[in-house]
Image: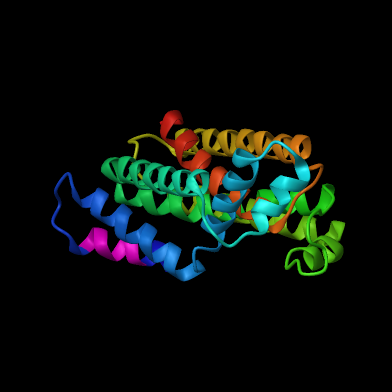
Amino acid sequence: MQIGMSWLLLLLLPETPLAPLVVAVLGTAAGVLLTGAFHEDGLADVADGLGGALGRERALLIMKDSRVGAFGAIAVALALLAKVALLALLGSISSELMCLALFLGHVVSRTWPLLLIRFMPHVGDLAGSKSKPLAETLSLGALCTGLLWCLLALALAVFGAEANGFSAIDEDALALSLSILGGLIASGLAFVVMARWFWRRLQGFTGDCLGATQQMCELAFYLGLALAL
């Protein structure tokens, strides 16, 4: 939905320097509405819990609280601002590049949390947790299937762009592939930072940690892609 809406707006809006910014704002709003701010809520809870408490048990207790504190509000606000800014930057280069970044950013950032589920213990309120069943049922085969879908999306983006004469950066498919690689590396680094943070502070993950990881890895992908260009 977000990609389709962004593409349509890029076609309909007048070609001005502000058009990518308008598309980035409205597209991001559409994405938040579509997911019910599910991942942003996780980011807010993690920021409140790990930013507002030093002890593990106290942090887990804060993360269960439905109220949003100062750390959470600031984290979500900065994340949304960064997302809009990065997408607007990519859109100012090419509308195709913005849509390509959206497609891959969503796929890649939703793949990294699978590694948390598979290789880290679930902590927190086990009885009422919505993410605990995932941790119990995600087999190695399911993880490999998720990774395969991510690789297929990356291959589709590169070869599809080459077949359609993608020229957002006025170079060949190799340059585009290297730019995507930059996004992947940045997203992977963000995942490592988040995983180490959760392990050091919580000795595991919660459902909120999955949402926060998705948000940070998505932002890192856009940033890495922009830097690689």
> Which residue sits at x=28%, y=56%?
23
Main SS of the magenta part reads: helix
Measured as percent of width and height from the top left, residue 6 is found at 33, 61
Query: Horizontally, is 21 left or right of 51 in the view?
Result: left
The quadrant where residue 202 appears = top right
As rendered, which of 216 and 47 lies closer to the eye? Answer: 47
Residue 171 seen from this side: yes
Residue interval drawn in magenta: 5-11
The quadrant of the rendering that contains the C terminus is: top left
* Magenta span contains residue 60: no
**Residue 174, placed above or below residue 217:** above
> Which residue sits at x=38%, y=57%?
28
Residue 155 seen from this side: no
As rendered, which of 65 and 191 lies closer to the eye? Answer: 65
The quadrant where residue 81 appears = top left
As rendered, which of 206 and 152 lies closer to the eye? Answer: 206
Query: Horizontally, is 220 left or right of 127 in the view?
Result: left
* Magenta span contains residue 8: yes
The quadrant of the rendering that contains the N terminus is: bottom left
Measured as percent of width and height from the top left, residue 78 is found at 42, 42
